[in-house]
Amino acid sequence: MAAGARLLARPARRARFWQGVAALAPGAPGITAWGVVTGIAMVKGGLTTVQALGITLITMSGTTQLVAVPMLAAGVSLPLIALTAVLTGLRFPVYSAALANDLRHLPARWRWLAGFLMTDPGSAIYLNRRARERPFANRIAFYSGVNYLLWPFWLAGSFAGIFLANYLPASPKLAYLGILAVLALAAPLIRGAPATSAALAASLLALIGRDWPWKLGLISAVVAGVAAALATERWQARRLARQQADTAARPGTGGGANP
């Protein structure tokens, strides 16, 4: 609590925090809807209400939960389920690598919290803002705004889905609500060349690897998306540097020798 108070002690930090909240706000209904779908799927998949509530509180990842539930229902051994969950969540180490320098100076306990509450949409919003705004001042406050307040939306949706599941008929059509929710979150974030290249690369790998074992297609799609975005950012930076060098070298522009 004290660290949180220090984070928002300065007006500039508070303003940056609320900028993060505002950036997340358009995706809040989609996050809640994804939570509802996940909660329903867990109960319909055979978990009790208590089990579903427990996995929701422990695991903040709808994808991991949806992968684990059918394995639990099929009686797969817990070590294998745990391994599958780890493989499904391997995109988060990729996000962590991209954010490592920004979070490095935080105390260990706050880095753990930042890692636990790291989310797909929050990380995407943060990385997009960081790429567009340099220098990126008060970045931890912005990161907190786009990630930490997402958890209550997720929990609210998941809890609602868990308690509504017993009153809804089982239907595979419910899964499409989750797909629509994810699309509603992702589409507004595809802005600029890095985001576009990331979306194209990730989509291509996801299609190619949809039948790969151990969810390797999903993992490969995440890695390909991040790599494409980073490569595009570097290409843009080199292109801008060349343009600036060419401009400075032209006569009459402040660089080179004037006749």
Image (cartoon, rainbow, N blue to C red):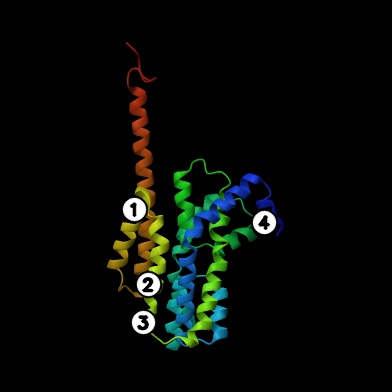
Rendered residue at 56%/66% (across/down): 151
Could you tell which of marks 3 and 4 lies nearer the N-terminus? 4
Q: Position of residue 101 (x, y in %)?
A: 53, 50
Residue position for label 3 = 172
Residue 179 on image: x %, y %: 38, 70
Residue that badge 4 annotates: 4
User: How far is mark 1 from mark 2, CA to CA?
Assistant: 23 Å
Q: Residue furthest right?
A: 2
Q: Amino acid at mark 3?
A: Pro
**Left/right of residue 63 with respect to residue 251 in the rendered view:** right
Q: Is residue 98 visible?
A: no
The earlier-in-sequence mark between 1 and 2 is 1
How would you rate the neighbour count of disc 4 (Cα within 10 Å): few for under 14, some for 14-19, many for 20 or more?
A: few
Q: In the image, which disc is placed on residue 215?
A: 2
What residue is drawn where x is 67% and y is 46%?
10
Could you tell whether 66 is left or right of 12 in the image?
left
Q: Residue furthest top?
A: 259
Quick one: SS at disc 4? helix
Which label was assigned to residue 196?
Answer: 1
**Callout 3 touching callout 1 (CB < 8 Å):** no
Q: Earlier in the sequence, mark 2 or mark 4?
A: 4
Q: Earlier in the sequence, mark 3 or mark 2?
A: 3
Q: Find numbered disc 3 in the image and state the secondary structure of the residue it sits on.
A: loop
Query: Is label 2 in a helix, a strand or a loop?
Result: helix
Percent across and percent down for residue 156 are 55, 72
Task: Tell me how far mark 3 sits from mark 1, CA to CA.
Answer: 31 Å
Sequence-first disc among 1 and 4 = 4
Q: Camera-side residue: 18 or 91?
A: 18
